[in-house]
């Protein structure tokens, strides 16, 4: 779905599909979509949500979603560009935000696993440090990257498509996998 075709009359399911970070953007500005009391139905339109949630301006909400999406896109780094940065004289710190089991099974060479201790060290360290986060397929990376940037680490990027894209575009020797959910 094209983001240009969205309007205040679009259902939230279409908005969520077009703007993967929409829930985070709505919650951070309007406290909408993050919990049961402020959630929304897939068929509810942005206009209906705006009215129900305190008579917000739906056009302003849509503008905020577009701006947030643009910011999310700027945070992404393509696998090929990351490869060249890792090969440079000053490579970024590459941080794996997946589960310990996933990291132990397959990881990008030179990456470190995100632990609470590492997180605290990074938050207390150099705010200009170049950091690239990655997950499995890029579905949660932007949430992690936004959280890091929100804690002052403005030079944080997110691997576009996660380790799955890396294994397809840069290092085909890395095993691809899919998660089985019971």
Image: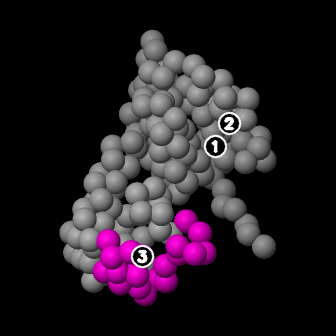
Q: Is residue 109 left or right of residue 33?
A: right
At mark 1, the secondary structure is loop
Numbered disc total: 3
Give coordinates of residue 175: x percent, y percent. Answer: 66, 48
Indicate yes or no whether the magenta region holds residue 163. no
* Direction bottom: furthest residue: 43
| Proximity of marks 1 and 3: CB atoms separated by less than 8 Å | no
Q: Label 3 to label 2, Cα distance in Å?
A: 36 Å
Depth check, mark 1 against mark 3: the one in front is 3
Does 138 sit above or below residue 17? above
Q: Label 1 to label 2, Cα distance in Å?
A: 5 Å
Of residues 122 and 181, which is closer to you in this image? 122
| Proximity of marks 1 and 2: CB atoms separated by less than 8 Å | yes
Of residues 36 and 10, which is closer to you in this image? 36
The tag earlier along the polypeptide, 1 or 3, is: 3
Q: Residue at x 26, y 78 (%)?
A: 8
Badge 1: residue crowd in 10 Å (few <14, some 14–19, many ≥20): many
Does 111 sit above or below residue 164? above
Q: Residue at x 48, y 39 (%)?
A: 150
Residue 97's disc is: 1
Q: Label 1 to label 3, Cα distance in Å?
A: 33 Å
Q: Residue at x 38, y 64 (%)?
A: 19
Q: Which residues are magenta?
A: 34-56
Write down the residue under mark 2.
Answer: 114
The tag earlier along the polypeptide, 3 or 2, is: 3
The tag earlier along the polypeptide, 1 or 2, is: 1
Write down the residue under mark 3.
Answer: 53
Q: Is residue 47 left or right of residue 41?
A: left
Does 7 sit above or below residue 110? below
Which of the 4 image quarters holds residue 115?
top right
């Amino acid at each position: 779905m094209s983001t240009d075709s969205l309007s205040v009359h679009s259902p939230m399911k279409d908005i969520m599909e077009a703007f993967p970070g929409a829930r985070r953007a709505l919650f951070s500005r309007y406290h909408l979509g993050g919990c049961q009391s402020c959630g929304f139905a897939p068929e509810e339109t942005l206009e209906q949500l705006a009215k129900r949630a305190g008579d917000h301006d739906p056009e302003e909400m849509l503008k905020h979603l577009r701006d947030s999406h643009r910011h999310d896109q700027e945070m992404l780094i393509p696998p090929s560009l990351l490869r060249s940065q890792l090969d440079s004289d000053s490579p970024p710190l590459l941080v794996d935000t997946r589960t310990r089991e996933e990291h132990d099974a397959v990881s990008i060479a030179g990456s470190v696993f995100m632990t609470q201790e590492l997180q605290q060290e990074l938050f207390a360290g150099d705010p200009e440090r170049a950091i690239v986060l990655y997950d499995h397929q890029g579905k949660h990376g932007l949430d992690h990257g936004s959280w890091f940037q929100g804690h002052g680490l403005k030079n944080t990027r997110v691997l576009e498509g996660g380790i799955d894209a890396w294994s397809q575009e840069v290092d085909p020797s890395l095993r691809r996998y899919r998660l089985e959910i019971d």
